[in-house]
Image (cartoon, rainbow, N blue to C red):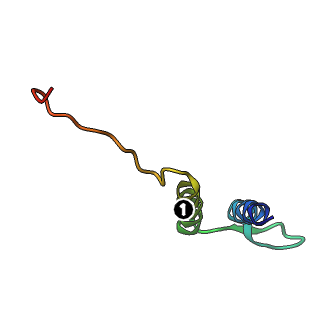
Amino acid sequence: MAEETLDSLDDAIKENAAGPAKASGDSGSMEQHPLPDQIAADKYLANKKAMASQTLGLRRARIVPPGAV
């Protein structure tokens, strides 16, 4: 249930960032969200996705220097 709420919240953030910030009626004018706000929303969603992964965005590798074998 909580996962569904988080998914719907992510979808709502994506839709709001993609949609207009302001819109008028008959004149047809509209204003887009500022680019820094769109970038911030994208970074937020990317960070949230990275935190949900099991590796948390990190890789683990074993380094063996040559000649140590």
Which residue is depicted at the point 82% across and 73% down?
24
Occupied quadrant, residue 2? bottom right
SS type, badge 1: helix
* Residue 43 at x, y percent in the picture: 53, 61
Q: Nearer the viewer, residue 29 or 2?
A: 2
Horizontal side of residue 33 vs 47, given as left or right = right
Horizontal side of residue 6 vs 56, given as left or right = right
Q: Residue furthest left?
A: 67
Occupied quadrant, residue 44? bottom right
The residue carrying pointer 1 sits among few (fewer than 14), some (14 to 19) or many (20 or more) residues within 10 Å by Cα, namely: few
Q: Residue furthest front?
A: 69
Q: Nearer the viewer, residue 14 or 48?
A: 48
* Residue 68 at x, y percent in the picture: 12, 30
Which residue is depicted at the point 70% across and 62% down?
10
* Residue 13 at x, y percent in the picture: 70, 65
In this view, 68 is above or below 24: above
Residue at which label 1 appears: 39
Q: Nearer the viewer, residue 24 or 12?
A: 12
Horizontal side of residue 53 vs 64, given as left or right = right
- Which image quarter is the C terminus in? top left
Which residue is depicted at the point 60% across and 60% down?
45
In this view, 53 is above or below 63: below
Count of marks, rendered view: 1
Q: Nearer the viewer, residue 26 or 41?
A: 41
* Residue 1 at x, y percent in the picture: 81, 64
Occupied quadrant, residue 41? bottom right
Q: Amino acid at mark 1?
A: Ile
